[in-house]
Amino acid sequence: MAEITAKMVADLRAKTGAGMMDCKKALTENQGDFEKATDWLREKGLAAAAKKAGRIAAEGRIHGVVREGSKLGALVEVNCETDFVAKGDDFKSICETVANTVIDKSPADMEALKAELGNMITEAVARIGENIQVRRFARYEVAQGRVHNYIHGDGRVGVLIEMTAAGSVDAEALKNLGQELALQLASMKARFIDRTQVPAAEIEHEREIYRAQLINEGKKPEIAEKAANGRVEKFYKEICLLDQEWVKDSSKNIAALIKETGKELGTEITVTQFVRWEKGEGIEKKSDDFAAEVAKAAGLQ
């Protein structure tokens, strides 16, 4: 069998755009024959898949899986190029596999997750014909309590929340609380559990902005200072889950809801962590100017 050198792999990668490991495998499978290896990559769709990797993937879905009696859960975001593909059963199956891999393998980071997935994503790109990317994941596990997930709008928004309980609790009651908290997070977009998690620099930045706004409105500096503190309090109630008014009953905040539920169940319940994601948030989406595209095609630009 011909020796497969690093240069051969690099040359094949340069020609086809396929991944290094795929190029090495192609050469190995074809005894070092460059042309046959090229054809092998094309037949497998791996060369085409590599070319699609640079295309913008801002569609897709947030997907969650909870198992082991709701003690273990994962949330993932997998992106593709079009909403049509995102709604297909094939893509949904990919998301399910990724989430279950996160649960089963507990990868330390994205590189570790990609290693666990192997060629699954590359093969899916070749099969479906769009760029597909696993963007992020979260994995929670509790010994006592509940991991709860909520997916809204066919994968547009996803929430994963971890709650611990000081003692054994009624599973259905804890599930109901988890759902209420997940709905709250999905709709009200809290960024922190409580005030202790908010960076002091962020609060001071907001206070300075409020103070400047009030002075520009004609308030005296000492009045502006007091009023700015009041606006900071309002800011806390916007970004901290426990400070937020419950969307179903504005007479109580989320901290009161959790405390009330814990009292009914006879144990202390604590929200220890959560994530709330929106599909494609932060990804710069391609902006197509159809008129300009037509004009360019017609030679008018």
Image (cartoon, helix red, strand yellow):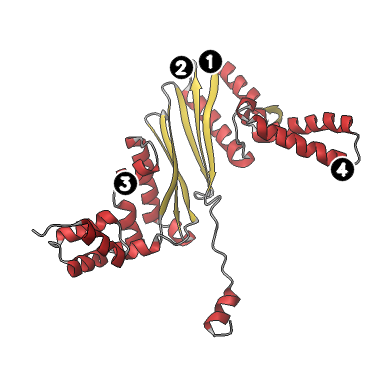
> In this figure, which residue is indicated by the disc labeled 3?
117
Can you give x and y, in whole percent of width and height, for residue 14 in the image? 30, 64
Q: Which of the marked residues, 4 or 3, is nearer the chain's N terminus?
A: 3
Against 159, residue 83 (above or below) is below
- Name the residue at 62% across, 40% down: 189
What residue is shown with label 1? 267
**Residue type, label 4:** Asn
Marks 1 and 2: CB-CB under 8 Å?
Answer: yes
Q: Assess whether mark 4 and mark 1 are in contact (beta carbons under 8 angstroms).
A: no
**Residue depth check, mark 3 versus mark 2: number of the one nearer the observer:** 3
User: The disc labelled 3 sits on which kind of residue?
Assistant: Leu
Q: Earlier in the sequence, mark 1 or mark 4?
A: 4
Q: Residue furthest bottom?
A: 299
Residue designated by label 2:
168
**Answer yes or no: do the residues labelled 4 and 3 have beta carbons within 8 Å?**
no
Question: Label 3 vs label 1: CA separation?
Answer: 40 Å
Residue 194: x %, y % from top left: 62, 27
Precedes in sequence: disc 3 or disc 2: 3
Cα gap from disc 2 to disc 4, whole angstroms: 55 Å
Task: Name the amino acid, label 1.
Answer: Thr
- At x 55%, y 50%, the residue is 281
Q: Quadrant of residue 237?
A: top right
Q: Are circles 2 and 4 on residues that touch, CB within 8 Å?
A: no
In the current view of this chain or complex, which residue is farthest to the front? 7
Q: Quadrant of the N terminus?
A: bottom left
Q: Choose mark 3 or mark 1, whichever is in front.
A: 3
Residue at mark 1 to residue at mark 4: CA–CA distance: 50 Å
Among the two numbered marks 3 and 1 on one chain, the one whose residue lies closer to the N terminus: 3
The vertical placement of 40 against 161, above or below, is below
Residue at 58% of width from left, 21% of height from top?
261
Say which mark, if any, is on residue 294. none
Which residue matches tag 4?
216
